[in-house]
Amino acid sequence: MVTTSASSDNVTSVITDPTASWIIFTPSAATLSGNVPTSLNNGTFLITINAESISKGLSYSFQLRLVIQDISQDYSVRVPVVASNAFTINMAKYFPASSQLTALDTNPKANWISFDAEENIIYGSVPDLAAGAVIAVTVNAFSTGSSDSSAALYTRVFSLEIEENDIPDYNVILGDEFVIDLSLELLNEPGDYLTSVSTNPTSEWVTLNLDNRTIAGTVPITLAAGSSVSVTGDAINPSLGSSYRKQYSLVIAAGENITVPVVVGDGFQVNLTEYLQNTGDTIRPITLSPEVSWVTLNTEQPPYLYGTVPKDYAGSEVNSTVIAISQVTGLTYSLLVTLDVFATTAILEFDPAEPFVVNLVPLLQTSSDLVNSIRTYPEIDWISLDASNRSLSGLVPPTQPSGTTVNITVDSLTADVNAANKRDLDGILSRQTETESGKLDNLILSAFFDVVHSTIGHGLAAVKFSPFGRCFIERAVERALFKHSILNRAFDK
C-alpha cells in the first residue's frame, strides 16, 4: 500500500500506463493498493498522480514507478544465522538512505524477528530451530521523495537460513598458553570476522586478538580440570551487512588424565607417584569438582589420594585436579584424577592356568549389545577382544608379578534404549534407571594396583594375578547410564 499525498492536499486523478485495473486508488485514504496478477512476470507500470493544493491554489502531479519481478525467480537475500543465537541485518545496504522501514512480515510466522526504524535494522534471537530451516522475511520501506525525486515503496525479501548451534570444543591445558582460530567455525569463512567475545563464567584471561579471528590467553593453574568456559563471539558478514553470534567452549584439561573406579561404601587409595614427572615433586592442595568432603590428599611421600565413598553418595564421578611443581624445572603441571563411582560388585570365576575366555554377554545391558573395543591400563598384550563373539581371551604370563592388577575398559553399544528400565542384572539393579540414548557409555573392566607403587581400591575386587592360582572376575554393575565395571581378581593358592 502506498500513501499518495499530504493530508491537506487532494488527489484528483490516477492514471496508469499501461492500464491496470488491479491497481486501486482509494480517495478517502489517498492510497494505492492491489494484488499483482500471477500472470505477470517482469514489467513496469508508470503511475501518474494528479493533485491539488487547496491552501496554495496550485495543481501538480508526480509519478510512481511500479516494478514487477519474475515470481519464478528467487530474489531473496540468503542470510545464514545460528540457532539459539542473536542476529542483526543492516538495511542500509538494501534500501536508499532516504527511506524508512515501515513493515515486516515472516513466513512461517516468527514473532522473534523485529525491525527498528531508527536504527534501520531487522534483528532477533533465533530459537533452537533445526538446522536447514528457512524463514522468509519480507521488509517494506517507504521514501517520501524530494523536489527532484518521487515517493516510493521498497520491498526486499530475506531468507534466514538456520545453521546448527554445534558449539565446538577446544581443549586448553592448565597453566599453558593457547591461541585458537575461531574464524574457521564462522558461517562464511574467510570473509566473516569477530568484533568481540564474551565468556561465561567471566574469564579475563581470554582475549580477542587484533586480527579479529583468534583468541589467546594463559589458562590459570587454579581452575578445575574438567570444567569449561563458554565463549560467545559476535561476528560480522560484511558482504551481507549482517551480524550474528557464534558459541564455542573451552574445555579445561590437565596434562594427564587418570580414571579410577570406586564403589559406594568402600575405601580407596590412589597413589600419585607414578604420575608425577619426578619423585619428590611438590603437590599443591587439590581442587574437587563437585566439592566433596570424603576425598583427602596425603602430601607426604609417597603422595596419594584416599577416602571412603559414602553409601548415600548419588553422584556419578568426582574430578580431583592435582597441581604439582617439578623439582627439576620449577615448572607447574597438572593431573586430573577422576573417581568413577559404581554401585556394587558381583563375581565370575575362571581358571588362568589354561588360556582363558571371558564371555562379556552376561555383563552387557542386553544380550543384543555390541562390543566395539577395549583399552587396558597399564598397557598389556596378553588380553585380547573378540568383538564378533563379544569375549575376552588371554593367558596370565608367568612374568606378571603377583599382587599387581590390570584395568580394562570396554566400549559397547546397546540396541535397546529401554533396556535399563527392564533388566535386572543378576539381582543387582542400576542406580540410574532412566535412559537417554542407545549408546553404552564406557563399559569398564577395572582392577586396582598395590599401595605405594600403584592404585588400591579397598573393598573392591582387586586383581592379584598369580600364574599358578585361580582367577575371579568381579563385576560392578551400572553406576550410571549403561555404565558397568568389571573387576578382575585372582588369589594365590
Image (cartoon, rainbow, N blue to C red):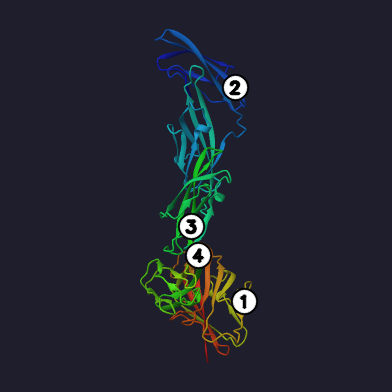
Check contact, mark 2 vs mark 3: CB within 8 A: no
What amino acid is at disc 3? Answer: Leu
Dot placed on the residue nearer the N-terminal end, 4 or 3:
3
Q: Is residue 87 above or below residue 310?
A: above
Q: Secondary structure at mark 1?
A: strand
Residue hosting label 1: 384
Mark 3 is surrounded, within 10 Å at the Cα level, by few (under 14), some (14 to 19) or many (20 or more) other residues, namely many
The part of the image, by quadrant, that contains residue 355 is bottom right
Please name whichever residue, 269 or 104, is drawn nearer the observer in this view of the structure. Answer: 269
Q: Secondary structure at mark 4?
A: loop
Residue hosting label 4: 418
Dot placed on the residue nearer the N-terminal end, 2 or 3:
2
Cα distance in 3D space between marks 3 and 1: 36 Å
Residue hosting label 3: 250
Q: In front: mark 4 or mark 3?
A: 3
Give the left or right position of residue 53, taking residue 22 as reference: left
What amino acid is at disc 4? Answer: Asn
